[in-house]
Amino acid sequence: MIASNAQKTRVPAARWQRGVIEDLAGTRTPDEIFEVMLSEAGDLGFEYCAYGLQSRLPMSNPKVFTVNNYPSSWQRRYVEQSYIRVDPTVSRAIRSLQPILWSDELFVESPQFWEDAQAHGLRHGWAQSSCDASGQVGLLSLARGHKALTEREIDAVSVRAAWLANVVHERISEAIALPARDGPKVHLTEREAEVLRWCADGKTSADISEILNITERTVTFHISNSLLKLGALNKTAGVIKALVLRLL
């Protein structure tokens, strides 16, 4: 595995990227895409690979898609114990696009989860999140049971793993079409977005009228149009949905 990793990271990045894109171009189903991911994970020195994609809407019950080659016993354990609620890689992925290196410090608040994972052969890993314009969050996880990652290996893998996470995110999104991506596209005008940004800052219609030097009636008009486009019943829901969809 390590030798293969060294060989892979010596291939020029542009050539490697072209190879991955060509491999993904021939895929149609999530399983076919995952086979490409699994091959790349192996070449980067990891025996396990996982990918999860979560829509941001509806916020009360977001849709989740996952695929992995973790031991079946660990997959069952993860579901039975509802470990997704305490998995720090998942919570961090939602908040940040920074790479996540598995460590005792990372799992300090979920010791049982970490102990269980290691008992199932998941001892060393790397995770990289991604996000698209519709607000969907993806998480690529690479793991193995042998030998901790060295600093040199981390440097070599980090750039490629980040790029792979983004390419796979787009390809998986197209293949499974979660509701957030399947739904109608929302386009706010520049003024509508500007008004909602001030709403997000807690400004009233009267405040916004004064700030933008427009009538309060015009402010209300823009807010109403925005809520109609967003399918929101009130201003608070509209602002939240616009933020989730990265329209502000």
Image: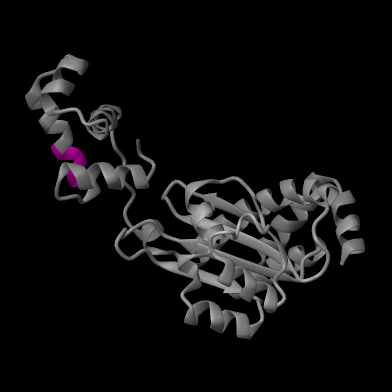
Q: Is residue 196 magenta?
A: no
Front position in the image: 132 or 97: 97
Q: Is residue 149 left or right of residue 65?
A: right
149 w.r.t. 195: above or below: below
Residue 143 placed where, x, y %? Answer: 71, 66
In the rendered image, which quarter is residue 123 located in? Answer: bottom right
Residue 209 placed where, x, y %? Answer: 14, 20
What's the residue at 86%, 56% (across, down)?
8
Q: Is residue 172 left or right of residue 135?
A: right
Quarter of the image where the C terminus is located: top left
Q: What is the tally of numbered marks visible in this picture?
A: 0
Does the rendering let one see residue 206?
yes
Residue 234 placed where, x, y %? Answer: 14, 46
Q: Is residue 178 left or right of residue 197?
A: right
Q: How is the image coloured?
A: one colour
In the rendered image, which quarter is residue 57 located in? Answer: bottom left
Residue 225 placed where, x, y %? Answer: 17, 39
Q: Which residues are magenta?
A: 224-229
8 w.r.t. 193: above or below: below
Front position in the image: 114 or 206: 114
Front position in the image: 188 or 89: 89
Does the rendering let one see residue 174?
no
Return the residue found at the far left. 217
Quarter of the image where the N terminus is located: bottom right
What's the residue at 48%, 48% (across, down)?
95
Dominant SS type (magenta): helix
Front position in the image: 212 or 188: 212
